[in-house]
Image (tube, grey):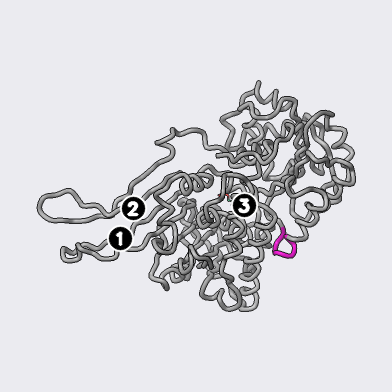
Amino acid sequence: MTATPSATAPECRALVLFGATGDLAKRMLWPSLYALDTDGLLPKAFRLIGAATSKQTDDEFRQKVRDAICTSANASLFDEAKFAAFAARIRYVTVDIQTAGGLDSIKGALHQGEGGVIYYLSTGPQLFGPICLALRDAGLIDPHSRITVEKPIGTNSKTAHEVNEAIGAAFEEHQVFRIDHYLGKEAVQNLLALRFANAIFEPLWNANAIEQVQITVAEAVGVEGRWGFYDGTGALRDMVQSHMLQLLCLVAMEPPAGFTPSAVRNEKVKVLWSLHPITGTDVETHTVRGQYAAGYSAGQAVVGYRDEKGASPSSDTETFVALKVGIDNWRWAGVPFYLRTGKRLAKRCSEIMIQFNPAPFNIFADIGATLSPNALLIQLQPEEMITLTLMHKKPGMNEVKLAQVPLNLSVGETFGHSRRRIAYERMLLDVLRNNSALFVRRDEVEAAWKWIDGIIDGWKTTGYAAKPYTAGSWGPSAAIALTERNGHSWNE
Ligand code: BG6
């Protein structure tokens, strides 16, 4: 699903990838660029310039890109002839990304011609400012240039503001593409279609008809060798500030005036402004922090977070967080939005559940039937599925019995099981097409951080410690209590 590109611009002529040998580049970016090339979606003569600190030749670097593609989720696309054509686009330059020194070599690797250059910063956010300013000072930015940055943008609202200021000193906001890869997932984009291409939901999509909303992003993996990064971040900053709040915005936003980047983003940011603050001792009733202890994942024994490689045995960083969130506006007043995310949970699954109010009166009570409220379940991954639960009569002559049954739409069965694309393929294509609808605007990032700051301050001032949970479970029992206090329970 692609919104109308925001402006007509000449085709880009190159992408310069800073952090070209890093983990994200290897797992996601090179395999995604390769897939776009094999689909014929990269402009003719488009050049790909990898920039990193190590010294190596173009051919040595191309070999690394080849290895990365062959061990990635797109390995099945690999073909020698297609890779040879892809490799011909690639150059490598050594750049000191700490100081952004050596940018002259980028000039040398860029060919002359029409079209802008995309700078993709797959580096730590502390380097965004220095790299942007160095690009500007080296005369490498023009009105057709674009800059793409990865989350996290800062670690709180102050540092996010500083990073955005530094980017803004070199680029206009319309040139900036802030990636949240969840917005590149097909199922996430379909949320907009589900809500705004169907008339049946909108009259029910509010506090009059909806009792509660749940958003779960559960991961079975642990910190995957990233303990050093993760320990300074934690689940709230890593997942909630970005992916979970973006999902919440798509569920809760008002209908946009059109399917344009600014119309969609205007409505999303209003949701962020309406989040009820969770501050001070509210964190004790509205949030749960957890940290995984040893347990089992997919039948294998796994160590606890504090015993991971390189870990500190006294770390209190949360690997799980659950929140009860309120949205202070006319549509959602009084409806709890429960959010939960964590690592080393029972299984990988991301889903949104909208639970409607119970039937106002049960005419079947005398025959012993209880009625379960209707729910709309939107499964985002691992499979894409939409389920509406309904009460239904069990077929039979003698007695009336009711059962809750699912009305299912499996995206794979309906549209065919096509290759599951890496979300970055969509994101990179949209940067090339100058379409910023699926990218996060500066005001969204800063509004999200402002709300997150309140929770982090509350955790600090109350000394709210992370509760241990067994790896392979659904998190600490306090997360169950969070919903049960309101008479709700997590969908499992
Ligand atoms: C990233 C987080 O943004 O998203 C990771 O930094 C997390 O910690 C990942 O594992 C999850 O993404 P996905 O696409 O696998 O659900």
The segment highlighted magenta reads 154-160
Marks 3 and 1: which is nearer the front? 3
Specify whether residue 461 is in view. Answer: yes
Q: Looking at the picture, which amino acid does disc 3 mark?
A: Arg
Question: In the rendered structure, which amino acid carries the disc numbered 2?
Answer: Thr
**Looking at the picture, does residue 93 appear above or below residue 305?**
above
Q: Residue at x 41, y 71 (%)?
A: 486
Q: Secondary structure at mark 1?
A: loop
Q: Residue furthest left?
A: 398
Q: What is the three-letter code of the residue carrying label 1?
A: Ser
Which residue sits at x=49%, y=54%?
Answer: 297
In contact (CB < 8 Å): disc 1 and disc 2: yes
Q: Is mark 3 within 8 Å of ligand 1?
A: no
- Image quadrant for the N terminus? top right
In the figure, is residue 342 to the left or right of 404?
A: right
Camera-nearest label, 2 or 3 = 3
Q: Earlier in the sequence, mark 3 or mark 1?
A: 3
Q: What's the distance in space between the residues labelled 2 and 3, CA to CA?
A: 31 Å
Q: CA distance from mark 1 to mark 2?
A: 9 Å
- Is the Cβ of the residue at disc 3 closer than 8 Å to that at disc 1? no
Q: Secondary structure at mark 2?
A: strand
Visible residue check, residue 323: no
Q: Is 125 located above or below residue 363 in the figure?
A: above
Q: Which residue is mark 1?
A: 372
- Does 159 appear in magenta? yes
Left or right of 447 in this view: 482: left
**Residue occupied by mark 3:** 265
Helix, strand or loop under label 3: helix
Residue located beneath label 2 in the image: 389
Q: Earlier in the sequence, mark 1 or mark 2?
A: 1
Q: Residues within 10 Å of mark 3 (few under 14, many from 20)?
A: many
